[in-house]
Image (tube, rainbow, N blue to C red):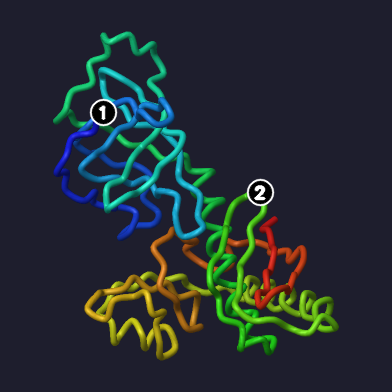
Amino acid sequence: MMEQNLSPTNLEYYDDMFKLQSTAILLSSFLNEDDGRQTLILDSTVFHPQGGGQPSDTGSISNSHFNFIVQDVRSKDKIVYHYGYFDKSNDGSLDVKKGAQVFLNVDEARRKLNSRLHSAGHLLDICVRNVGWGHLEPTKGYHFADGPFVEYKGVVPHNELQSKQKEIELEANHLISKGGKVSVIISPYDKASELCGGSLPDYIPKDSTPRVVKLGESPGCPCGGTHVNDICEILNLKVSQIRTKKGQTKVFYNVV
């Protein structure tokens, strides 16, 4: 059973998106009663939990007494839960002690793919505005490897869909070929608003210090995910289709 009154998990990836290894202190280890998965809680983590449309990292958590395979990571009430299994039979003899130091290792290939997909979603926002669909308001994105898309509030004429799909893809790959530094800036609300083109979404508290991601010189957006270091690392973006229905427009894409 999870222990109560735990402090919020320190998110190491939040400050360093390219960090794949770290050490932490084990705070709790228990069997999740809802789904039967083993669960570890640490004082800090380099694993990105599923959220903001981005899939979770996977990898391992280990020390000299055990090796825990991380299959899924979730965050709730500022506590990060690492779900998975011990790669040796957990018959009660495993030496998994609260307060032990552990080594965290993130799967690099999965992190890089997730970061490329996530960055590509933000790049699409830029391209949608650049081709004349600036009235569309991004609401959410699902940057999953089996079908990523960005959803917008607002519709576009059906007779524009095919031509704009080609324009958006061409614009995206033009920006990818040019490249540009991807930067993460944590700043006071007013400065963050300026970095995002003059406004922030209503869900961002005015007394907060938002984390803004900027792709090159384009306006940024608030985001807690991981990204590429340079736009060129996306490599190539394919817009597979655009759907507009019931006041919403979805742009489906992939990176290849």
- Which of the 4 image quarters holds residue 245? bottom right
Can you say which quadrant of the picture contains the N terminus? top left
- Say what secondary structure mark 2 lies in: loop
- Say what secondary structure mark 1 lies in: strand
Which residue does the image show at 26% across and 9% down from the upper left?
93
Distance Cα–Cα, label 2 vs label 1:
31 Å
How many numbered dots are placed on residues in this image?
2
Query: Is the residue marked by circle 1 packed among few (<14), some (14-19), or many (20+) residues within 10 Å?
Result: some
Which residue does the image show at 50% across and 74% down from the upper left?
215
Residue 86: x and y, percent? Answer: 38, 21
Residue under numbered circle 2? 146
Which residue does the image show at 85% across and 83% down from the upper left?
159
- Mark 2 touches mark 1? (CB < 8 Å): no
Residue 208: x and y, percent? Answer: 25, 75
Upstream in the sequence, badge 2 or badge 1? Answer: 1
Residue under numbered circle 1? 29
Can you say which quadrant of the picture contains the C terminus? bottom right
Residue 177 falls left or right of residue 112: right
Q: Amino acid at mark 2?
A: Asp
Front-lying residue, 33 or 24? 33
Q: Where 138 falls versus 31 (above or below)? A: below
Front-lying residue, 120 or 231? 120
